[in-house]
Amino acid sequence: MLALQILIDGFAVSALYALGATGFTLIFGVSGVLNLSHGAIMVLAAVAAWAAGSVLHLDTYSGALMGVGVALVAALITYFAVVQPIQRSRKIPNEEKEIFVLTGTLLWGIMIQELIAYFFTNNAKTVLPIVEGVVSIVGVRTPRNEIFTALVCCLVIALLWFLVNRTRTGKVVLAASMNPRGVTLLGFELTNVYIVVWSIYGVLAGIAGVLLGMFLGVSSYSVGPLTASAFSIVVLGGLGSVSGSLIAALVVGYLETFTAYVISPAYRTIPALLLLVAVMYVRPQGLLGRR
């Protein structure tokens, strides 16, 4: 029974991590930005959905949409107020811009975290689930919301695949990840491509954050671990590789779930971090990475 419980719970956690890490990877693949405010944006989405129901007394669906909308706005603010000014600055040498972007997004994430703690305290927030009740799977009682979470994550990832591989906008984004200069020569404005990518990222992070709030609950203290998990996943999978991130999310999700059940929830992130260190020594480019 324990093995089946780990299998079910691990898949739901992996699907959540995969959804969040996909947007994280997409941004790096297209614009070369590692957004260290990722965890803060996910938590912000969950807290916004919680506040919509608990403070504004909106229904669950409206609260979820509000959470995703807030994450979208936060992602665009991150790009326009933090990332773009650094990338366009003439005072910062080109070889130093990457570290400035890392620092800027990290500080922005800390600001969001502190604002959440100031207005809503550090207490854990749980978003009311869209699907309630419990179902028995081969004798294991599983919340319907857990199954709903996994299915929604898989559906959204499938829709993202369709968008990138089967639409004109997606093909432009894919081309920009391979050859930004070539996209510019074809007459496409890179800034517009980046706006599309950050918008997609905001929606993905928002959905993942709201579902996480429904599944496990969040607090301002969740910001660091969520960012660390996403970073571990994209490095394990290979920076810029969406396929690699999906595989790594599955590995990390099951590692954390196994550790939480067998050892202690307090140590759930340690095995994934140890695996990350090992991969960086043995295969620095990750599972499917090219950089």
Image: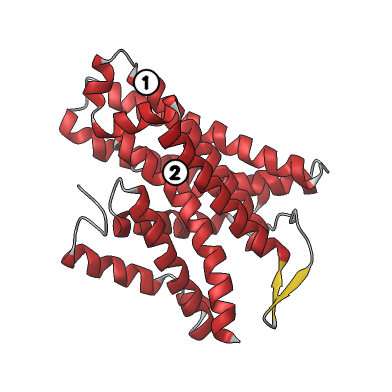
Residue 155 located left or right of residue 20 = right
Residue 92 sits above or below residue 114 on the image: above
Crowding at label 2, few (<14), some or many (≥20) Cα neighbours within 10 Å?
A: many
Quadrant, the N terminus? bottom right
Q: Residue at x 55, y 34 (%)?
A: 72
Residue flagged by tag 2: what amino acid is it? Answer: Gly
The numbered mark, 1 or 2, whose residue comes first in the sequence reads 2
- Residue 229 coordinates in the image, percent (x, y): 42, 59
Residue 276 location, quadrant: bottom left
- Residue 287 coordinates in the image, percent (x, y): 26, 59
As helix, strand or loop, the secondary structure at mark 2 comes to helix
**Depth check, front residue: 102 or 146:** 146
Crowding at label 1, few (<14), some or many (≥20) Cα neighbours within 10 Å?
A: few
**Depth check, front residue: 201 or 95:** 201
Residue flagged by tag 1: what amino acid is it? Answer: Thr
Residue indicated by mark 1: 191
Residue 1 sits above or below residue 258 on the image: below
Q: CA distance from mark 1 to mark 2?
A: 18 Å
Residue 101 sits above or below residue 149 on the image: above
Q: Residue at x 57, y 85 (%)?
A: 2
Residue 33 appears in the picture as rendered: no
- Residue 179 coordinates in the image, percent (x, y): 23, 29
Residue 241 appears in the picture as rendered: yes
- Residue 149 coordinates in the image, percent (x, y): 63, 57
Is there a contact, CB below 8 Å, between mark 1 and mark 2?
A: no
Residue indicated by mark 2: 23
As helix, strand or loop, the secondary structure at mark 1 comes to helix
